Image (spheres, coloured by chain):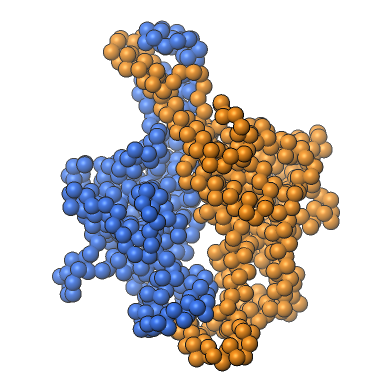
Amino acid sequence: MARPTGSPSLRLDDLIADPQTRIVVCCGSGGVGKTTTAAALGVRAAEQGRRVVVLTIDPALRLAQSLGLTALDNTPRPVTGIDTASGGSLDAMMLDMKRTFDEVVEQHATPEKAAQILANPFYVAVSSSFAGTQEYMAMEKLGQLREQARREDRWDLIVVDTPPSRSALDFLDAPKRLGSFLDGRFIRILVAPAKAGGKAYFKAVGATVTVAVGVMTKVLGGDLLRDVQTFVAALDTMFGGFRERADATYALLQDAETAFVVVASPDRDALREASFFVERLGQERMPLAGVVVNRVQTLAGNLSRSRAEDAAAALDEATPRSSASADLLRLHADLATMAERHQAQIGRFRSGNPGIAVTQVPAAARDIHDLEGLREVGATLAG
Amino acid sequence: MTPSSTPTHPATAGVRLHIVTGKGGTGKTTVAAALAIAIARQGKKVLLAEVEDRQGISQIFDIAPLAHAETLIFNDPAGGSLWGLAVEPKAALLEYLHKFYRLGRAGGLLEKLGAVDFATTIAPGLRDVLLIGKVYEAVGRRTGRGRSAAPVYDAVVLDAPPTGRIGRFLGVNEEVAEIAKVGPIRGQADSITALLQSRITAVHVVTLLEEMPVQECIDALAELTAKRMPLGGIVVNQVRDPILSDADLDDLAGGASPQLRAAIADDLTHAGVAQPNTTADTLLAEAAEHLERLDLQGEQDQRIQAQGRAVFYLTALADGLQSGGITVLADELHAQGMV
């Protein structure tokens, strides 16, 4: 496909061949093929000699099976069928969000206190359904894998698939959101009013606080507020460690050993999300390798849309030898229209994001659900 | 404008609250918007609401971002109108507090103390009660007092959270069971559940004919059934137009014969296409890939059909939603009797 000069193309082979690359994070909005991209990169890197672990969040069943993932057990397991001739290997795992959270608690608290926290109804709610917990735990797991890689020298490349959030930015914001929620003003007021700003402050706003707590008790119920109080009090001692870890992982994402790959499809919405993400990574000084646009309609041959339409119309007027001829031309015109639209969307993205490397993955006729399919995707990602 | 004589499908007849869900990326916002347009074009007053702070509606209609206030999107010549609303949990909570506790300015103080943030993040169930509560209120709102007063909106279309969260989102009763055993929240959750389980509500699931979206669609149908939510239709989005006739498909099945290739090349020559032989090969290769896609679609369509639900199909528009594509989809839904 012709590219306007000056727009670099993304060469992922160079990225995975570079031993300095230790972490690749695939992110993008839902339904754009993030997991497939992450898995394909993992397979390709492994077959080129990297010792890889792929962390997936919520893979399609058949894709998971192709990686030998049958259980969500939070443990990396070897993927069979990988060509290890170059000395590489591939492990894969699915994130168990609640289990990961439990482990964090167990690591940071005395057994007695951990048991108390794990049984707290508010903890159960937060660890299994708080918006952002999955993102937070994906980050936590990434940090753990990085530590384990360093300690055991089992892997030299971690490929992470990010949670299927409604927007690509959730991945960066959610951990902070959970942190700032637990650190939030009202929680602090509930747990220890004086901490909110000294005794004088509390005296001044005392009546308001009483009203506020009263209303919240009515709205949320006294039990929940008590659960929150005991939970936050129990967490308080380990809270520093908690936050430190989140900060450390955030810093890891800014490190030169990390590369972000933003995944999109050639639709307006997905590419707009990709633009937001590219911009945001720049603000956070997180290293962006480039953008992968999946499912792009390509067009073989050099028959244009309008010529195909004209020819089909001409055949309608005549008596063609095959009734299929005009229909095949119409099919071609349809594909050409879609290909034009995709290129127009990508072109708009490129001009809005100058200097950002982009690679396009042609739309496959079938879903990808085996290693062979992942190898083919990997080959188009190579650059 | 399409004729309004299409009989409405029994799965959606009498429905006033349409809840649209689907896996991310399947086009559920597009389908919700198309459905709302289709209803408005029948001379009805329709509210299209979103609850995920995505501004999906304003993007589809190319209008300024919506606020937590009902905004007119368009008036239809048939006398209908489409209104948009982006429900925002904090604003909904303040409204709610005002309504039930007559808080007045104290609401502002709660906000200042972080209590509003706290309450809307702390209990996902509460957040959902607030979000659906706003929709519930819009469905039940009447033009005047008394039982004979007409509803303000003939229909409300909700662009709901995706399939992965829809069960929890609609299951507000179970969700708040922990936090509220009595009191206004409990009462609100009970009323919402009664509406959601009534015959004026239908939950529609949007899917593509691809493995993962279909799987999520089937899973969601099972979950919603278990929660006794009234299911409407399955909307299959972006269906590839077969383009090729049955006769073509027969000719092409099992690979193109040399005779067919020669005939097509001749036809191309006749139609003035350059390089007829290479072009014939290109066209046949495209057809082979197209057939493979149609096969895959067929497989997935069988899984959908096996659900025994009303199924509505939307064709993939080659040039997307540009140049009025959304109204084409609205017409297709209407022509199939979804509304």
Q: Against A117, is B339 above or below? A: above
Is B268 placed left or right of B40 in the picture? right
Residue A91 or A215: which is nearer the viewer? A215
Q: Nearer the viewer, residue A37 or A258?
A: A258
Can residue B244 be seen here? Answer: yes
- Front residue of this view, candidates A351 and B210: A351
Q: Is residue B293 above or below residue A36?
A: above
The spot of residue A336 in percent (x, y) is 44, 26
Specify whether B182 is left or right of B289.
Answer: left
Q: Residue at x 76, y 45 (%)?
A: A21
- Quarter placement of the C terminus of chain A: top right
- Viewer can see residue B20: no
Residue A310, position as x, y percentages in the image = 35, 17
Left or right: where does residue A236 sit relative to residue A156?
A: left
Residue at image x 60%, y 29%?
A: A5
Quadrant in which residue B5 is drawn: top left
Furthest-right residue in view? A152
Name chain A's colour. Answer: orange
Colour blue belongs to chain: B
> Where is the N terminus of chain A found, in terms of image quarters?
top right
